[in-house]
Image (spheres, helix red, strand yellow):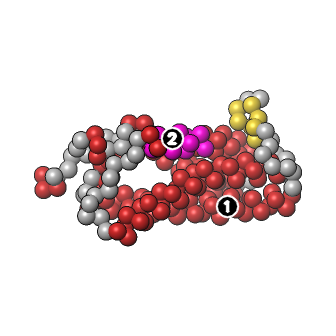
Amino acid sequence: MTQSTRFNGPARLLHWSMAALILAMLFIGVAMVASLADYGTLVALHRPLGLLILILAVLRLANRWRRPPPPLPADLPPWQRRAAHASHIALYGLMLAMPLVGWAMLSAGRIPVAVAGPLVLPPILPQSPMLYAWLRELHTVLAYGLFGLVLAHLGAALLHGLIRRDGVFASMAPWRVRRPAGNL
């Protein structure tokens, strides 16, 4: 597999790092809703991880702009090309929107966004209980959307890696994937 058919190293590193962070955030979010006993600890993890995801998403978009992804296989049906394009736009949108909505929600609730130690982010919205409630609901809805997209993304990766074996999964794999002799 040549370098032009693989994502560059920073893209792969950011992808897999963010995959782990996003999965952790989804599980932390579920645990926050389910456990009042551990809520403070979970929130203390959730906020800085959300900020880290926001920063990494911006870096990832900058890298993608500088180093476009490898092309999809020529034999991929047009509807799958459109679905791949739309799902990536939605994933990037949610990776940016989720932390920003969380930050906005906390700002509207006049809840400090502690990052680490004394470092606290400034509020980005004025205090408003109504806006806080609306943003909290939006954050939840977006989280469900992100979870659904992650599942769809995983399904597509498995389709490409196990069934089509067309190099799409291999292009983002953190390791070199050897393609079978019949798929050159």
Nearest to the observer: residue 162 or residue 81: 81
> Is residue 148 in sight in this rendering?
yes
The secondary structure making up most of the magenta span is helix
Is the N terminus in the top left, top right, bottom left or bottom right quadrant? top left
Numbered badge on residue 43:
none
- Pair 1/2: label in front: 2
Nearest to the observer: residue 154 or residue 65: 65
Per the model, the C-alpha gap separating discs 1 and 2 is: 27 Å
| Position of 163 relative to 43 (above/below) | below
For mark 1, does the 10 Å Cα neighbourhood hold few (<14), some (14 to 19), or many (20 or more) residues?
A: some
> Is residue 17 in sight in this rendering?
no
The earlier-in-sequence mark between 1 and 2 is 2
Residue at image coords 58%, 63%: 145
Stretch in magenta: 54-64
Q: Name the residue under label 2.
A: 62
Q: Is residue 63 magenta?
A: yes
Measured as percent of width and height from the top left, residue 67 is found at: 41, 41
Q: Is 169 on the left-hand or right-hand side of 38?
A: left
Numbered badge on residue 140:
1
User: Which amino acid, mark 2?
Assistant: Ala
Instruction: Determine the secondary structure under disc 1.
Output: helix
Q: Does the magenta stretch include residue 6?
A: no
Q: Is 58 on the left-hand or right-hand side of 115?
A: left
Q: In which quarter of the image is residue 4?
A: top left
Q: In which quarter of the image is residue 156?
A: bottom left
Instruction: Determine the secondary structure under disc 2.
Output: helix
Nearest to the observer: residue 89 or residue 119: 89
User: Which amino acid, mark 1?
Assistant: Thr
Residue at image coords 27%, 53%: 167
